[in-house]
Amino acid sequence: MTEVSGLTADEARIDHAAKAIRGMTREMSEELRLPRSPVAEALSKLTAQAPLRSLAIAFLLGVGATAVNSRPGGQSRIERSNSLR
């Protein structure tokens, strides 16, 4: 059965639900635009920077380990031990 809008009852319910969800989404996005407290802002920055710091430290440790393991002959300890096998 179609309603005045030309939609079936199921389509009208789906349309109504979609409009309600869009309305809730707008409300939530407006709430998220509110300014954050300084503590929340600092925590957000710290969380975003933590992976970059970890990656930088891992890189430096890897470069340092490579430099320590390098030998004048151009082979690392691992390469040298593998060539002895």
Image: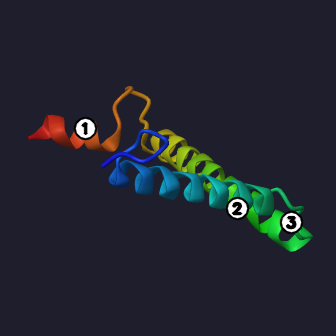
Q: Kindly identify the residue that appears in the image at 42 percent across and 53 percent down.
A: 14
Residue 79 in the figure: left or right of residue 48? left
Q: Nearest the camera: 31 or 76?
A: 31
Residue assigned mark 1: 80
Q: Secondary structure at mark 2?
A: helix
Q: Kindly identify the residue that appears in the image at 66 percent across and 56 percent down.
A: 23
Q: Is residue 50 visible?
A: no
* Res. 60 image quadrant: top right
Q: Amino acid at mark 3?
A: Arg
Task: Kindly report which numbered mark, 1 or 3, lies closer to the viewer in this rendering.
Answer: 3
Q: Amino acid at mark 1?
A: Arg
Q: Kindly identify the residue that appears in the image at 64 percent across and 61 percent down.
A: 24
Q: Name which of mark 1 and mark 3 comes first in the sequence.
A: 3
Using the numbered discs, state the Cα–Cα distance from disc 1 to disc 2 in whole angstroms: 61 Å
Q: Name which of mark 1 and mark 2 comes first in the sequence.
A: 2
Q: Residues within 10 Å of mark 3 (few under 14, many from 20)?
A: few
Q: Is residue 19 visible?
A: yes
Asked if residue 6 is positioned above or below residue 45 in the image, the reply reads: above
Q: Quadrant of the C terminus?
A: top left
| Image disc number at residue 42 | none
Residue 84 in the figure: left or right of residue 49? left
Residue assigned mark 3: 36
| Image disc number at residue 28 | 2
Using the numbered discs, state the Cα–Cα distance from disc 3 to disc 2 in whole angstroms: 15 Å
Q: Name which of mark 3 and mark 2 comes first in the sequence.
A: 2
Task: Kindly report which numbered mark, 3 or 2, lies closer to the viewer in this rendering.
Answer: 2
Using the numbered discs, state the Cα–Cα distance from disc 1 to disc 3 in whole angstroms: 56 Å
* Res. 71 image quadrant: top left
Q: Amino acid at mark 2?
A: Met
